Amino acid sequence: MKKFLTVVIALIMTLGLSQQAMALSIPVSNNVYDFEAGAFEAVDGWYVGEITVRWNGNGNNKADVTWTGNEGEVVVTPYTVENNKQREGTLGVKIKQTTEEQTVVFTLTKVNKQKLSTTVFVPALYEGPIYFDVLRTANNPGYYFSGALINMGVTLTADAVDKDTFSAKARVTEYNGTVQGSFGNFAWDPEKESYALGDGWARWNIVDAYVADADGNRVDKGNYVKLDIEWKTRTEPSGASSANRYDVPATRAAWYTGGSAGGFIAYASVEVDITQEKEIPGIASATYVQRETKHDPIFDKFEILDAPGGGKYALYTPENASEDNKRPLFIWFHGTGERYFGANPGGNLIGNRALSFADKEFQEALEGAYILAPQSAEDGWNANRLNDMEELIHQVVADNYVDPDRIYVGGLSMGTVMTTLLITSTTDNQINFAAAILCSGGNISPAQAEIIASKGFPVYLVGNTSDGAAAGLPSSLANLQAAGVDAKMKLYPAGPVFDGEFYYGAHDSWNYIYNNLVEDENGETIFEWLAKQSR
């Protein structure tokens, strides 16, 4: 039935109450010619939008607006006429959604009793299914499932959810088919034993839930909800040069279970069960369905392609690169466990978090830089790959806005083999490097040092005295300096590596580099050192 009642500020009609008809009196002129509903959207269980009224002449008369067809509350906020030059006004409209669709017809009755109408079709409350993606995040100790991004199907405001709105549990299966579990070193954290639910399942501890955009950024109004969970590993020193690592149950997203004999970094799969524990405005009922598993956001900034001669390569392109602003190129070679075996493209980016070179601190230090991270085939880095890597580097330089005077190269552990081959190359295709870094490995002979000296670029050596793979660094430094190379070394004292938050084995000195902790006697960081190098 029709509803008539004049109000001054807003009207509210409540579902389920018996009320007399309602209407709203608004200021217009005698010559109203347009009454039109604009775009509406569902927000927190209300269908929200505007109706525009247009007229000719001064808005010094009154017209009634009525509505029919609604089953839920209606809130209408009138406009005011500020001056006699005003020719339109906008009514704010909110219609409470119900479990049924509604067709609400708004009618404006002019002074001469003629009528103008506009219709708003109100969808029912959303009933799902609701889909979510599982998120992964890299830090230096490893790769972890860090939460979920839920596409709610409706628009929500910031106070619609909190960390208690949902609960979640997960079960993780390694690449080799092993279901994660157990408690102890390099397994689940014994301090989190209460998280275990049996059969490989564990409770995910939700530490925050908030309305987000499609990229997971917190917003005041959006269609997504981001769940952040507890995921960071706990580490402790173990003996003279080792470290223990304990993972939050059901959160580790990659481990060394790949390759023909195992031992290569491989991505794990995860099953996640999300339950809605509290009412969410705009959601009638919901079944939460797992969809994709997304990489770390920085991972997705790399393009991963086939490398010459086998394996892959990952390339990060800085946003500010252009023909008029050529940027440096930094090439980084991974260690033994990050080789490509056919099912782990980009594993070298997360196995030791080479993603750090595309992260804010490194990119700001170099004011934007290309990052090239080749990933070897299963046979690793050796002399057979020299031509392939020189071809790849020349290709990247030719296809991008690279400053040829600022090409840097480095590597860790097995990656120092490929680095050394490149910086001592005498082929017709050799690269004119501006600087090199060798970490946790490397042996530079006097003859190789002479070749590097003839090319005229500096070398930085980083390692730990407890690391047998780095035992050759002091003699390499002596050979380089004897040949006249501008070489320096940071050799850390015996003990596990500690970056201020996590402990690692003594071999893992690359974490000092990734966190820009390497400093010389003058306090210059390795990022600052690299940034100033040019041919």
Image (cartoon, rainbow, N blue to C red):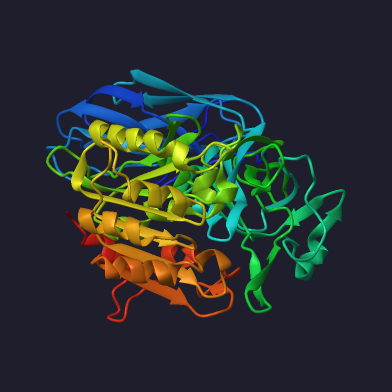
Residue 54, percent from left and from top: 24, 28
Q: Is residue 135 left or right of residue 328?
A: right
Res. 321 visible in picture: yes
- In this view, the residue in front, 364 or 240, is 240
Q: Measured along the vertical axis of the image, is residue 276 above or below residue 457?
A: above
Q: Which residue: 35% across, 75% down?
A: 519
**Residue 6 shows in the view:** no
Q: Residue at x 52, y 75 (%)?
A: 465
Residue at (53%, 34%) from the top-left corner? 21
Q: Position of residue 209 (x, y in %)?
A: 59, 55
Q: How many numbered tags mark residues here? A: 0
Horizontal arrangement in the rendering, residue 212 relative to residue 141 (left or right): left
**Residue 334 vertical placement versus 71 (above, below):** below
Quarter of the image where the C terminus is located: bottom left
Query: Image point 40% across, 73% down: which residue?
Result: 490
Quarter placement of the N terminus: top right
Q: Quadrant of residue 23?
A: top left
As drawn, is 274 to the left or to the right of 116? Answer: right
The residue positioned farthest toward the right in the image shown: 198
The residue furthest front is: 447
Front residue (pair 151, 70): 151
Q: Residue 10, how many percent across, how many down?
A: 43, 46
User: Residue 215 at what x, y percent from top left?
Assistant: 46, 43
